[in-house]
Image (tube, rainbow, N blue to C red):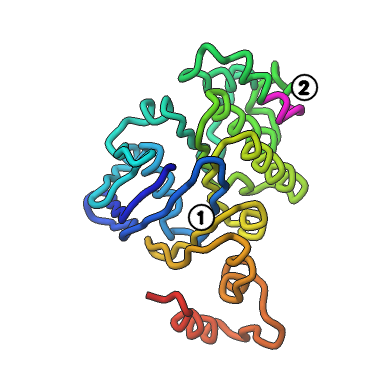
């Protein structure tokens, strides 16, 4: 079990980004983390993967645990060796290197299993077999996302943290990424999925959390969130018949009286 408890994170000793966040990612589960831009979703992922320092952030209260053991002060390399891999928003591949060179970089924490894990990645992403000797920077956005996810899988992670994997991709590619996430999970990897495409995320997740302004404001099974009228309107863009808000003023008023408002 990977999780955070009453986590409070501050940037530059000034900006309070997380305000007592608690959530859990069980082994072998897909957990969706939803919320508007700036809600604190990426900060949660950085806290779990040890990347807060890169952004001048630090944990002020609470903690991060793996199987009950505190890991919040470990460096990213140590966390990677414990099976926690983070696929950053925007893909962040090495564009001057070939596809296979990018993938092999991800095997640094499991050098003995390179051949086996490379085969697994190519089974998941057959398109990359055709591109393995090509320069990664010339790939399409969807192919680059496949490389980024594949690189994280090269060490056989126990938990995979995905930050906006469908961002900027065509609907057909989004569907492929969704199916690949399901298959990765079926093979035994726990997934924390941060997604603006809430419908996609909740359709494959076992559990979901909704964040607003650094707090978790809803915490339910994914199917329940998918059926919730408030979530459907404000995160899925769906309105109950006859209840569509006609103006921004009405929307603001409605948001102030949402059932989950703190």
Q: CA distance from mark 2 to mark 1?
A: 33 Å
> Is residue 72 positioned above or below 118 on the image?
below
Residue 36 can be seen, yes or no:
no
Task: Quickly name the residue at label 1.
Answer: 33
Circle on res. 130: 2
Q: Label 1: how many residues lie within 10 Å, few (<14), some (14-19) or many (20+)?
A: many
Place of residue 38 in the rendered image (x, y in percent of width and height, measured from the top left): 43, 59
Residue at 28% over, 56% down: 15
Quadrant in the rendering for residue 188 = top right
**Residue 206 image offset from top left, x and y in percent:** 59, 53
Q: Mark 2 or mark 1: name the one nearer the start of the chain.
A: 1
Magenta highlight on residue 126: yes
Q: Say above or below: 192 vs 198.
A: above
Quadrant of the rendering where the C terminus is positioned: bottom left
On the image, the x and y values in percent for residue 194 come to 53, 50
Local SS, label 1: strand
The answer to whether any part of residue 215 appears in the image is yes
Seen at 33% across and 44% down, the residue is 64
Residue 131 in the image: above or below residue 238: above
Determine the residue positioned at 38% across, 26% down: 77
Element marked by disc 2: helix
Q: Is residue 34 magenta?
A: no
Mark 2 Cα-neighbour bin, 10 Å: few <14, some 14–19, many ≥20: few
Which quadrant is home to the N terminus? top left
The residue drawn where x is 65% and y is 33% is: 146
Residue 26 as seen in the image, left or right of residue 165: left
Image marks 2 and 1: residues in contact by CB distance under 8 Å? no
Disc 2 or disc 1, which is closer to the eye? 1
Q: Which residues are magenta?
A: 121-127
- Main SS type for the magenta part? helix
Q: Residue 36: where, in percent of width, then height?
A: 50, 62
């Amino acid at each position: 079990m990977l999780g955070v408890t009453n986590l409070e994170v501050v940037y530059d000793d000034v900006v309070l980004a997380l305000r007592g966040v608690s959530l859990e990612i069980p082994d072998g589960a897909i957990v969706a983390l939803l919320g508007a831009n700036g809600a604190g979703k990426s900060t949660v992922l950085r806290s779990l993967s040890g990347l807060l320092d890169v952004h001048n952030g630090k944990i002020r209260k609470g903690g991060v645990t793996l199987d009950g053991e505190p890991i919040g002060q470990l460096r990213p390399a140590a966390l990677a060796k414990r099976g926690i891999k983070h696929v950053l928003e925007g893909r962040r591949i090495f564009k001057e290197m070939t596809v296979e060179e990018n993938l092999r970089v991800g095997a640094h924490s499991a050098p003995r299993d390179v051949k086996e894990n490379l085969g697994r990645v190519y089974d998941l992403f057959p398109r990359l077999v055709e591109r393995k000797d090509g320069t990664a920077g010339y790939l399409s956005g969807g192919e680059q996302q496949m490389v980024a996810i594949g690189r994280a899988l090269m060490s056989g992670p126990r938990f995979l943290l995905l930050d906006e994997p469908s961002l900027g991709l065509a609907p057909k590619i989004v569907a492929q990424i969704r199916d690949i996430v399901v298959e990765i999970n079926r093979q035994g990897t726990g997934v924390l999925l941060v997604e603006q495409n809430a419908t996609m995320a909740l359709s494959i997740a076992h559990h979901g959390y909704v964040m607003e302004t650094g707090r978790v404001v809803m915490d339910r099974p994914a199917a329940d969130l998918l059926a919730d009228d408030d979530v459907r309107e404000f995160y899925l863009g769906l309105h109950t018949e006859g209840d569509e808000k006609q103006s921004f003023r009405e929307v603001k008023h409605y948001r102030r009286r949402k059932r989950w408002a703190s």
